[in-house]
Image (tube, grey):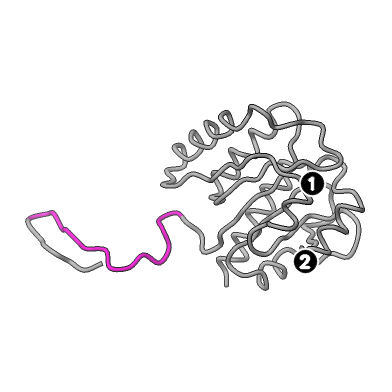
């Protein structure tokens, strides 16, 4: 910022360069979460917005039991309320539901997914090599199927772990996003 004028207790400045928006992380996070029943997906939208994700991709998987038709407006209202509560100046883009196969071929940035079984790496290590844009994929109850994990690996997605316990989807989404922010902002 360059100081333009100073009168009494008022200073006026000209913004010369914006490096990181106020309240914005250096990571551009996208969340692709399997749709779940009840209002639990609303909780995911709310918490992901509070964390500062750039986009939310409702995900249809083999074990999904819910369709996302007609819920986009509701999720947008949930995101708006969460953004207001947190004082955020941007809202995440909430996209139309997408299949796992479609996202695997077009997901933005590096893709990281929670894998309950299989060779995984710690989240912090994956974030350090992922770059600035990261898509976090969170599976439904029971996790991604073996075939879905294979599809994600073939698409270049990295399987990650948070610890030894199996988390509910809402908890896993928040933990993975917060872990990405912590690891990414530490770089």
In the image, residue 155 lies at what x, y percent? 78, 63
Asked if residue 103 is among those painted magenta in the image, a careful observer would answer: no
Of the numbered discs 2 and 1, the one sitting upstream in the chain is: 1
Looking at the rendering, which quadrant does residue 10 occupy? bottom left
**Count of marks overlaid on the render:** 2
* Towards the viewer: 146 or 42: 146
In the image, residue 39 lies at what x, y percent? 68, 28
Span colored in magenta: 8-23
Q: Which mark is residue 156?
A: 2
Q: Which residue is at 62% across, 53% downward? A: 30
Q: Which residue is at 61% across, 39% downward? A: 45
Residue 49, compared with residue 69, is above or below; it is: below
> Is residue 13 found left or right of 5 in the rendered image?
right
In the image, residue 11 lies at what x, y percent? 15, 58
* Towards the viewer: 20 or 135: 135
Secondary structure type for disc 2: loop
Secondary structure type for disc 1: loop
Asked if residue 20 is among those painted magenta in the image, a careful observer would answer: yes
Instruction: Kindly report the secondary structure that dominates the magenta region of the rendered protein.
Output: loop
Q: Residue furthest left?
A: 7
Residue at numbered disc 1: 139
In the image, residue 114 lies at what x, y percent? 79, 55
Residue 119, compared with residue 79, is above or below; it is: below
Mark 2 or 1: in front is 2
Residue 45, compared with residue 166, is above or below; it is: above
How far apart marks 2 and 1 lie (CA) works out to 17 Å
Is the residue marked by circle 1 packed among few (<14), some (14-19), or many (20+) residues within 10 Å?
A: many
């Amino acid at each position: 910022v360059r100081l333009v004028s100073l009168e009494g207790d008022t200073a006026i400045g000209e913004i010369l360069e914006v490096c990181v928006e106020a309240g914005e992380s250096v990571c551009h996070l996208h969340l692709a979460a399997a749709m779940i029943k009840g209002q639990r997906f609303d909780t995911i939208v709310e918490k992901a917005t509070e964390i500062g994700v750039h986009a939310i991709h409702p995900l249809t998987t083999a074990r999904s039991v819910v369709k996302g038709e007609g819920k986009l407006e509701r999720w947008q209202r949930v995101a708006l309320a969460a953004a207001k509560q947190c004082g955020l100046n941007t809202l995440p883009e909430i996209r139309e539901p997408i299949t796992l196969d479609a996202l695997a071929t077009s997901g933005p940035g590096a893709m990281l997914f929670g894998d309950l079984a299989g060779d995984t790496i710690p989240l912090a290590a994956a974030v350090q090599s992922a770059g600035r844009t990261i898509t976090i994929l969170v599976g439904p109850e029971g996790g991604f199927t073996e075939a879905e994990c294979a599809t994600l690996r073939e698409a270049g997605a990295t399987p990650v772990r948070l610890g030894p316990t199996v988390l509910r989807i809402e908890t896993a989404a928040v933990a993975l996003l917060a872990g990405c922010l912590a690891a990414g902002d530490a770089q």
